[in-house]
Image (cartoon, grey):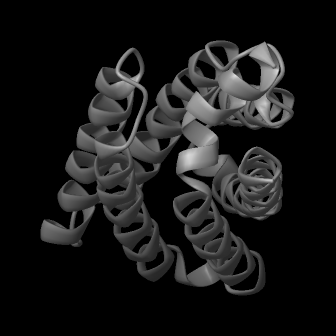
Amino acid sequence: MNEIKGIERSILAQESWALAVEGVIALIIGFMILFWPPAVVSIIIVVGAFAFVWGIFALVASITADKGRRWLRILEGVCGIIFGLLILFWPGISTVVILWLIMVWLVVSGIFKIVGGLTLPKGDGSKGLLVVNGVLALIIGVLLLSLPFLEGLLTMAILIAFYAIFSGIMLISLAFVAKSAQGQIAA
């Protein structure tokens, strides 16, 4: 019974719709980057739009979030919105600077996802998926930061694409797990 109460309060069970939308957007961005890598500047603008929308979803999701985790979702949303707006308002900024921001964003979002996953209740089946997604974002971000920048632009684009695709699949899976938990609670 305590496990069901914990799942009922789970932030992911309350945000399954946001996770699914984020997952679909991440898949679209990942495939765009993978099949259109020479147009990195255009793709980076799409990534900026994704970060902005992701931030808005995080803020909206914070409304129904568990009180103890609300501040984390608000901070996550504000960071996503700021990052997205930086790209959208200054698309002429050097691609190098924007890619550095993406790398830092991957590291920061990875940390938020790991912390968010670790704070979920013990019986929540989505806990592991969220932590794995965060660890992958953190690894990709650190790996990208360690690459020789100008020599590895195509490699960076491909790594970002694979992360976006994996993240999209993971987020959609999380949405289904969360929705299933909601259905079990209602039954």
Give the x, y percent position of residue 70.
Answer: 34, 27
Question: From the viewer's perspective, is 72 left or right of 170?
Answer: left
Whether residue 25 sits left or right of residue 2 in the image: it is: left
The picture places residue 138, in percent across and down from the top left corner, at 67, 27
Quadrant where the N terminus is found in the figure: top right
Q: Nearer the viewer, residue 37 or 61?
A: 61
Q: Residue furthest left?
A: 89
Name the residue nearer the viewer: 102 or 4: 4
Q: Quadrant of residue 160?
A: bottom right
Residue occupying image coordinates x 76% and y 63%: 172
- 21 versus 152 height, above or below: below
Left or right of 142? Residue 63 is: left
Q: x, y percentage for residue 78?
A: 23, 40
Give the residue displayed 29% in from the left and 47% down from the top. Answer: 59
Task: Indicate left or right for 171 with 109 as reference.
Answer: right
Q: Where 30 sits versus 80, above or below?
A: below
Q: In this orientation, which residue lies closer to the viewer: 160 or 70?
A: 70
In this view, 104 is above or below 80: above
At horizontal 63% and vertical 56% (from top left) the residue drawn is 153
Asked if residue 175 is positioned above or below residue 78 in the image, the reply reads below
Q: Could you tell me residue 151's position as x and y percent?
A: 67, 49
Quadrant of the rendered image containing residue 19: bottom right
Foreground pick, 38 / 81: 81
Residue in view at x 28 percent, y 29 percent: 75
Count of marks, rendered view? 0
